[in-house]
Amino acid sequence: MVSETEETQLNSLENQVDNGGGGAWEYLCLVRKLKVRRSEKVFKYGLSILNDPKKRSALGPEEWTLYEQVAIAALDCQCLDVTKDCIKVLQKKFPESKRVGRLNGMLLEAKGSWSEAEKAYSSLLEDNSLDQVIHKRRVAMAKAQGNISEAIELLNKYLEIFMADHDAWRELADIYVSLQMYKQAAFCYEELILSQPTVPLYHLAYADVLYTLGGLENLQTAKKYYASTIDLTGGKNTRALFGICLCSSAIAQVSKGRNREDKESPELQSLAATALEKDYKQRAAGKLGLLTSALRSMKF
Amino acid sequence: MAEDLVLDTAIRDWVLIPLSVVMVLIGVLRYFVSKLMRSFQVPDPKIVKEGQVIVRARNLRAAANFIPPKSFRSRRVYFSNEENGLLFVPKGQAQNAQAQMFSDPNMAMDMMKKNLSMIIPQTLTFAWVNFFFSGFVAAKIPFPLTQRFRSMLQNGIDLSTVDVSYVSSRSWYFLNLFGLRGLFSLILGEENATDDTQRMMQMSGFGFDPSKSLSAEKDGLDIVQHEWALPKFEHRAEAVLKKLVN
């Protein structure tokens, strides 16, 4: 996850480079460090640096990292010829390199020749069966081919070994949610919360899944997790506020007629509603009417 | 016995400084040689998996209060279950790590190479110091010492009446041996092969002993009492919203 300071730094650098203020190399380094996906910009600026022989020689040994970065960005922008040239240069310099082999595999993937890419990746895996990136590329390939069940299988096998990789858990949770396998998705989100308990995103997603699963216990748990999201984001997350309102009304509906246990926080719903109204007044005053009518219809 | 011996400044110029310089140079040389000789070690999947299991178990212990009690309990059983729990190591396997390290030819070769690259320069330098720089007082230690250190520090000096604070160049060699570690980490960056003292400590601990850390994690996990923190969050959210709305 990118922190806020890093994000502002990245954006300011991007603005600077966009408006012709130089600093392209720092921007590329920052993108590489933070692993964000800004392929168009990387492609444009990286290529301009590489095509200028003076700037290229000024980079020294970092030149090859830049070739790799531009190759991947070109794959993302579908400029396969540029990628081929970059890979050729890298291969001349590092003939037996696994990283170059991986880039070749990615190129085959981008061209759509799935079986050849699969062959390339398996041969790389024979040399080093614990290469995390190649495992992840195979999962991505399965997903791109639309073979979701195989993607799930590969990802599960990967997670059996590398179970502390939270990006993989996140991907698995996304896939499960897309397939509506909510119980499994809930498990993945629990793993994510365990590894990074202070990231509100995971609490929110977990609450969403629990709310979708339904049932009194899940709804109550979901409400608690929406509350924790509000706490972690200082009340600014609109989705969590809506979640609280919806959960409360759903709980009221489900437990109609049963003895309602004394809620620990009776004011939470009304507070959330008030906060929502305030937020809408500030940011989208035109939709305030819709909001109030929706909240009224929920009537807790 | 408290007379102050006046030591020739030539000793400083021709003994102390050259000795330090030579040791630094030898350390740098060893670093580059070790870089050349380093072979790529294929990571063992079992060890990687165990490392990851430990990280996951540790996360579970640390953040246990953030997930519902049912999920926590099911995870705990998954980890410390007697039959196929991830952290459960039957007693027989506990000794495997050491035996494995000896029998695996690659690892044995690696260890031998590392040991050699440490022992040979040390021996050579020590012999050189003894040959050239023995038989005279090289320096004075600024604090007083007891008589027991005499045999260690005053090896070349055959006078028993000289104060123990006056030492031979051999002790300067040892001082440099342990003291230059900090200097090397400055000029060579982290992870340099000259870290002799660390290596010596490692030799006694035999590196990564997975079974012990697994059982330690298991015990830690068994102890954890789950106290679900989420209900507290509802109150906190209320407070936050109250502040926001008012």
Image (cartoon, helix red, strand yellow):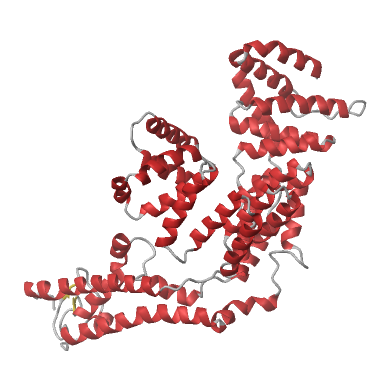
Q: Residue at x 51, y 42 (%)?
A: A36
Q: In the rendered view, does A98 fall on the left or right side of B176?
A: right
Quarter of the picture containing the C terminus of chain B is: top right
Q: Residue at x 37, y 39 (%)?
A: A24
Q: Looking at the rendering, which quadrant does residue A245 occupy?
A: top right
Residue B35 spot, x, y in % from top left: 37, 70
Count of all numbered marks drawn on residues in the image: 0
Q: In the rendered view, does A13 fall on the left or right side of B107?
A: left
- Residue B160 visible somewhere in the drawing: no
Q: Nearer the viewer, residue B203 or A239?
A: A239
Q: Nearer the viewer, residue A267 or A12?
A: A12
Q: Looking at the rendering, which quadrant does residue B66 occupy?
A: top right
The image shows residue B171, relative to residue A288, as above or below, that is: below
Q: In the rendered view, does B214 fall on the left or right side of A260?
A: left
- Residue B56 visible somewhere in the drawing: yes
Residue B109 spot, x, y in % from top left: 47, 82
The image shows residue B193, relative to residue A35, as above or below, that is: below
Q: Nearer the viewer, residue A129 or A238?
A: A129
The image shows residue B242, relative to residue B61, as above or below, that is: above
Q: Residue furthest bottom?
A: B158
Q: Residue at x 15, y 82 (%)?
A: B162
Q: Residue furthest front?
A: A81
Q: Residue at x 33, y 31 (%)?
A: A21
Residue A129 spot, x, y in % from top left: 60, 66
Residue A295 spot, x, y in % from top left: 75, 17
Q: In the rendered view, does A147 fall on the left or right side of A27?
A: right
Quarter of the picture containing the N terminus of chain B is: bottom left
